[in-house]
Amino acid sequence: MSRTDSTGFVAGYPLKAHNTFGLDVRAQWACRIERETQLMAAVRDPRAAGLPRLVLGGGSNVVLTGDFAGLVLLVALRGRRVVGEDADAVYVEAAAGEPWHEFVAWTLKQGLPGLENLALIPGTVGAAPIQNIGAYGLEMCERFASLRAVELASGETVELDAHDCAFGYRDSFFKREGRNRLVITSVTFRLPKAWQPRAGYADLARELASNGYAANGKQPDAQAIFDAVVAVRRAKLPDPLELGNAGSFFKNPVVSAEQFKALKKRQPDVVSYAQPDGRVKLAAGWLIDRCGWKGRAMGAAGVHERQALVLVNRGGASGAEVLALARAIQHDVLVRFGVELEIEPVCL
């Protein structure tokens, strides 16, 4: 049973509501962070000395395979504001605990387009740079300006720019050298004044066309793209509040031109996307589907029937079951296609 003391530390804290898979595990200690001063106090608390630390916002990119023997920092920092502009862009800042989708909707209400392709991605603003979230032709790093974070070792506040964050495809400094070293407290985005729609992604283009935007050269505005992205995502992806999941579970693999040529010869209909560096990105969902995994289950963990890239908790699944299912899928894809799938969420 959990208990709270005057410092906000909670012992034996249940984490089921703090991860979108709905995995029923507990934290040795947890502390809800609503102000930066609380964060600094929490990391300096003697009870946290020497313990592993885990930062959770919406818990949309994590698989908890068991109870966490350490301190969980529940980031609930809120706030969003316009902080400046220059000749080319407007800069907006959001606290790390702001729900990402709500923040994107807010920017549009301020008349500030630029993030609409990233609508309905689960999680918080603070998680967006860690994963370098992306969808429908846009990656977060393209709109990123800077972020503030607190160093766990010293409790000091630092500011990082895009170079410091070392963004890659669904990757960043925070998933590699910076893992468990910093807690992001706010993120500033650069939204272009000379906005242009990005509507070339096939599913998005089809949805926009169904709404009349392909006719007579009619171009969608940012709100139309936002609405179309929401419609496409809701049609393809399960709501974590109804069916536990972490969104796309595997990264789309990128292979060499030579490897792609050999694969294309064996599988002429393979779904692929040419990359600027000559390599080729493959659709992980297509690979998984071709291996017969769509709609299948192992125990209480399963593959969604409409999107093979999404693993789901069918009710009462453990993190170990989810991971076992993922390993089985990786094995089959490697055996059939010679392609290694990389898991996107952090598995603990």
Image (cartoon, rainbow, N blue to C red):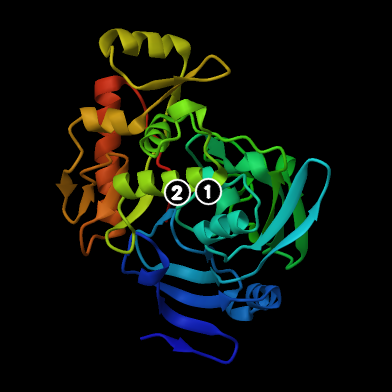
Above or below, 209 relative to 224: above
**Residue to which mark 1 is pinned:** 223
Q: Are marks 2 and 1 in contact (CB under 8 Å)?
A: yes
Residue 180 seen from this side: no
Quadrant containing the C terminus in the rendered view: bottom left
In the picture, measured across the screen, residue 192 lies left or right of residue 267, that is right
- What count of labels does the image hold? 2
Q: Characterize the local packing of mark 1: few (<14), some (14-19) or many (20 or more) Cα atoms within 10 angstroms.
A: some
Considering the numbered disc 2 on the image, is that residue within a helix, a strand or a loop? helix
Q: Position of residue 33 (x, y in %)?
A: 59, 75
Pick whichever, 108 or 235, lies toward us: 108
- Give the class, few, some or many, for how many residues have Cα within 10 Å of label 2's Cα (few <14, many ≥20): some
In the picture provided, is 249 more to the left or to the right than 75?
Answer: left
* Circle 1 SS class: helix
| The residue positioned farthest toward the front in the image shown | 216
What x and y, as percent, mark residue 23?
32, 64
| Visible residue check, residue 201 | yes
Nearer the observer, 329 or 274: 274
Q: Which mark is residue 179?
A: none
Q: Residue at x 45, y 61 (%)?
A: 59
Task: State the quadrant of the N terminus.
Answer: bottom left
State the image coordinates of residue 40 (x, y, percent, origin top left): 69, 73
Q: Is residue 229 left or right of residue 221?
A: left
Residue type at the position of mark 1 = Gln
Q: Amino acid at mark 2?
A: Asp
State how far apart marks 2 and 1 are (Cα).
6 Å
Q: Residue at x 27, y 33 (%)?
A: 288
Q: Which residue is mark 2?
A: 227
Q: Position of residue 173 (x, y in %)?
A: 63, 44
* Residue lying at the far bottom of the rendered structure: 6
